[in-house]
Image (cartoon, rainbow, N blue to C red):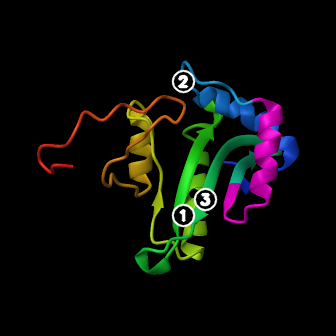
Amino acid sequence: MKAVEIRPIRRPDLHHILALYADLETPGDMACELSTAENIFARTQRCHNHTVYVAVVESTIVGVFSLLIMDNLAHGGAPSGIVEDVVVHPQWRRRGVGMQMLRFAMEKCRQANCYKLMLSSNLKRTAAHRFYEALGFRQHGYSFVVLCNEEPPVPKGPDPATGC
């Protein structure tokens, strides 16, 4: 395996990153426009605890992920880490790039004294689940999502068990 450099993104990286994310998208997802990506990049540059990283091999971007280290009032004030949008270029998968990216994220969280690092993964991505488990991640609790661009369901009335 050639040396992998993991570093924060730079503005010129954006079009490479958007191409990687296009591979991750499922039918119905909308690709991020470059102008939108530039605005997001500018915002993340002002946020010390949210960084998008790229994995680079011989000046070629082969992977990307986001890491947010979130301050908490619970858990004794210990922060927690959230990793999102992990993608490795198809030609570089199964070559250790993803492992290095996630170990990098784990180390960043250890350095920040995080009490946990979490991620979520689509239920259909069973190969990714095996990969995460091999790195020491384990299922913990339930993950819930609400799609913010859809109308929430109308409550059906009080829960008979609680009366609420």
Residue 131 screen position, x and y as percent: 44, 45
Quick one: SS at disc 1?
helix
Q: Residues within 10 Å of mark 3 (few under 14, many from 20)?
A: many
Quick one: SS at disc 2?
loop
Q: Which residues are magenta?
A: 33-51
At 40% from the left edge and 55% from the top edge, which residue is drawn? 137
Quick one: SS at disc 3?
strand
Residues 31 and 108: in front is 31
Looking at numbered disc 3 in the image, what kind of residue is underneath it? Answer: Leu
In reply to whether residue 13 is colored magenta, the answer given is: no
Q: Quadrant of residue 122?
A: top left
Q: Is residue 35 left or right of residue 66?
A: right
At 64% from the left edge and 24% from the top edge, which residue is drawn? 30
Residue 58 screen position, x and y as percent: 81, 46
The label on residue 68 is 3
Q: Tell me the residue that label 1 is attached to.
A: 106
Q: CA distance from mark 2 to mark 3?
A: 23 Å
Q: CA distance from mark 1 to mark 2?
A: 27 Å
Seen as rendered, the residue at the extreme bottom is 76
Q: Tell me the residue that label 2 is attached to.
A: 26
Q: Is residue 117 left or right of residue 1?
A: left
Q: Residues within 10 Å of mark 2 (few under 14, many from 20)?
A: few
At 60% from the left edge and 59% from the top edge, which residue is drawn? 68
Looking at numbered disc 2 in the image, what kind of residue is underneath it? Answer: Thr
Q: Quadrant of residue 32?
A: top right
Residue 44 screen position, x and y as percent: 74, 54
